[in-house]
Image: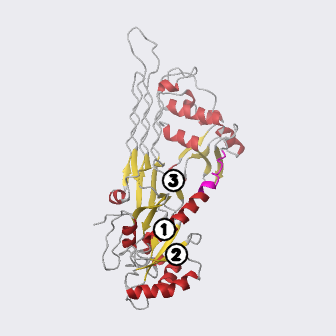
Amino acid sequence: MVTFVDQTAIHAQGGNGGHGCASVMREKFKPLGGPDGGNGGRGGDVVAVVDPQVTTLLEFHHSPHRTAANGKPGQGSNRHGANAEDVILRVPSGTVIRNDTGELLADLITPGDSYVIARGGRGGLGNAALASPRRKAPGFALFGEPGAHSEVVLELKTVADAALVGFPSAGKSSVIAAMSAARPKIADYPFTTLVPNLGVVTAGDVIYTLADVPGLIPGASQGKGLGLDFLRHVERCSVIVHVLDCATLEPNRDPITDLDIIESELRQYGGLDDRPRIVALNKIDVPEARDLADMVKPMIEERGYPVFEISAVSREGLRPLSFAIAEQVKAKRVVEAAVEMPRIVISPKAVDESGFTVVKEPEGFRVRGQRPERWIRQTDFGNDEAVGYLADRLARLGVEEELMKAGAMPGSTVMIGPDENAVVFDWFPAVGAANQGPRGSDSRLEVRPEDLA
């Protein structure tokens, strides 16, 4: 049974916004009560939030589809629809969120950090909010926006100060159990550890987190064994501790060879060359292992690595190793604290920036932009007055002017929106504001195209 998952896909759907309400007050002795349709409620978001009590992505592995509720529609008597509750995805510290192309969207580390994976749609305005001196009693309301759909990948990278790496059965689990209160599974066969284990170590005035990364083997960076699945848990560590087995009886295995192989895998994985290394020669409680450790220690020190002879069983050498790791962790924290936070520059849009584009295509003229596309989604095309209101908004935004500059003529085909879901219509320049007529109608739509020629 799977008990630990550090990578999974999420299919998130934001809630739809509630529709606005088109209503007119009808009350005794108040013949001119006016419009009183309320606005629709906002659809719920799907939000990832760091929870320190969560350590795995297992929950999302079993249920990857998350859908937020829709906002409630508005009602008469100026009653607005209720906003929908957000769907909160509680994720571990160190969760990275990427889109389906691998682009980094968020890196959530600090408890409380959040990222909106799929945003809910806005609620539509009711006719009370659409009323104006020119349109005193709108006979329409705006639709709520559909919620966004998003497919992302959640990837957990353990947040630890130091990582223990080495071959299977090198004694990493025993070391972390001896140095901290962690109690990982320990046995005398390879790949006993199937998930990263974390332990908190106190060395003088420094408290740091130690990660036991599952055993690596040759080819781990290409997916052999468990290495590729768990090499990502080394990325955030300040220092890498090589735990080398000096008592192994396997052929073609010795501390120097093991060190070269693991370093080769780390190098091929990439991004870890700047991390300081510490070498721990383990199992010196075995006489033959102590002799081997004494022999290879000078050879490893020639490479510039600090070397410690340790035994997780007798606890010999663990205290000096602990303080050496603490020294490296403390130095990294000092450097990080001295680094200035990047200055965030906010560049507001220019007041004359249109926010849309008009492009001539073989099929006609395509209008792209956040506001025109949103207005299209919110329009009830079965209501002539709503269509007229949309025409007024587009004209005020400057769409008609840009269409003329692009060469559009009366009757030209105009498309608003993306290629796969655009609204297509024959364009005729607006003829000014509509005269107030029956609710739900617009006198401009009664004009025949040939009358405008």
Q: Nearer the viewer, residue 33 or 99?
A: 99
Residue 233 visible in the snapshot:
yes
Q: Position of residue 433 (x, y in %)?
A: 61, 26
Q: Residue at x 54, y 82 (%)?
A: 300
**Which picture quadrant has residue 403?**
top right
On whether residue 337 falls in the magenta region, the answer is yes
| Secondary structure beneath label 2 | helix
Report the residue marked by disc 1.
234
Tally the marks: 3
Report the residue marked by disc 2.
266
- Find the distance from the CA under tag 3 to the CA under tag 1: 43 Å
| Secondary structure beneath label 1 | helix
Amino acid type at mark 1? Val
Report the residue marked by disc 3.
420
Q: Residue at x 40, y 47 (%)?
A: 88
In the picture, measured across the screen, residue 246 lies left or right of residue 426, that is left
**Which picture quadrant has residue 209?**
bottom left
Few, some or many residues within 10 Å of mark 1 (<14, 14–19, 20+): many
On-image quarter of the C terminus: top right
Q: Nearer the viewer, residue 19 or 89?
A: 89
Question: Of label 3 and label 1, which has the lower sequence position?
Answer: 1
Range covered by the magenta-colored residues = 336-345
Amino acid type at mark 3? Glu
- Find the distance from the CA under tag 1 to the CA under tag 2: 9 Å
Amino acid type at mark 2? Leu
